[in-house]
Image (tube, rainbow, N blue to C red):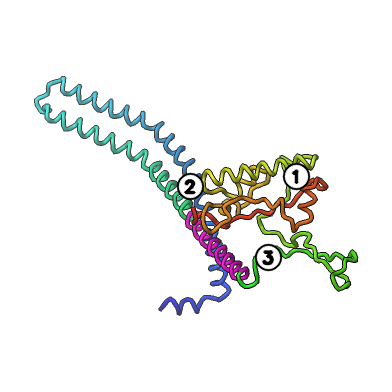
Amino acid sequence: MQIAQLTQMVPKGLTVKAARTLLQAQKHSPSLLFAGGVAGVVVTTVAASVATLKVDSVLQQAKEDRAKVDAVVQMQREDYTEEDAKRDVVVIYARTTIDIVKLYTPAFLLGAASIAMLTKSHSILMSRNAGLTAAYALLDQTFSEYRRRVAKEFGDDQEHKLRHDYEVEHNLTGVRDADGKSKIIPIRVGPKSPSGYARFFDQLCNNWNKIPEYNLVFLKCQQNYANDRLQSRGHIFLNEVYDMIGIERSRAGAVVGWVIGKDGDNYVDFGIFDSNNERARDFVNGREGAILLDFNVDGVIYDKI
């Protein structure tokens, strides 16, 4: 009977459940392999210790057998020559070696299996990380190309406005144009939707201070330091900048950042001096003690380093 026919005989719900269970096992395979490898290392250590305790008895038996051979040789029996003694000594050593190998074989096999499980776990994670990085890089490249097309079609200012989705307030203070008509002045006061890399610098951060001027000086110094590291090393990751500021790291921050090249800005900007953001202006002018930092990362930089 063919496999397809056997599959049709199995209830569909059962096959779906089995496939889902297999998929879940594959999903968690790195964790399972790692846990199995660690447990195997522990069991290997115990097995090796137990085998070591038994080695003394094997060696003692070999010593006794060798003493018997030496005793017979000293008796100078005619039916037991020197060649017979040498052969028996070789047999004793070979048997002792085999017994010792048997004692340590379980520990060796467990150790080899544990190393294989740990290696496989690492290999799976490396493969998945490579795939995720490639997918993230492709997404970032696609978005960057889209931004360039929008900027080419509508201009850089319009692209910046659409990307950050700025809130707009209208100035109705009675300002009139040359014809004497009321003039409505749009004012962009801040982005509705900051990027996914934006973080608040406030009282929850380790380096935040109650004095707004101190916070401004601190952030300017960290921004300058980040730019110095970028220029000296040629790259810097977002998580490194988070560490400088005292902000908790993120998963994305481990792969995105800045790199010196023709495709990036070639500088680190925290968004402190965004003239289109009224809240940033309040922070710079000392009227606000906290600020939402939005970083001008170049995207995934692993493939650009």
Quarter assignment of residue 55? top left
Q: Nearer the viewer, mark 1 or mark 2?
A: 1
Question: To which residue does mark 1 refer?
Answer: 204
Identify which amino acid the numbered label 3 is placed on. Asp
Indicate the amino acid at tag 1.
Answer: Leu
The residue located at (85%, 64%) in the rendering is: 171
Q: Is residue 24 left or right of residue 245?
A: left
What span is in magenta? 126-151
Magenta highlight on residue 149: yes
Q: Name the residue that disc number 2 marks.
A: 37
Secondary element at image label 1: loop
Badge 2 marks a residue whose secondary structure is: helix
Pick out the residue farthest to the right.
174
Provide the secondary structure element on which disc 3 rests. helix
Residue at the front extreme? 178
Q: Nearer the viewer, residue 6 or 120?
A: 120
Three-letter amino acid code at the position of disc 2: Gly
Q: Residue at x 63, y 43 (%)?
A: 224
Image-based side of 81 in relation to 195, left or right: left
Q: Quadrant of the N terminus?
A: bottom left
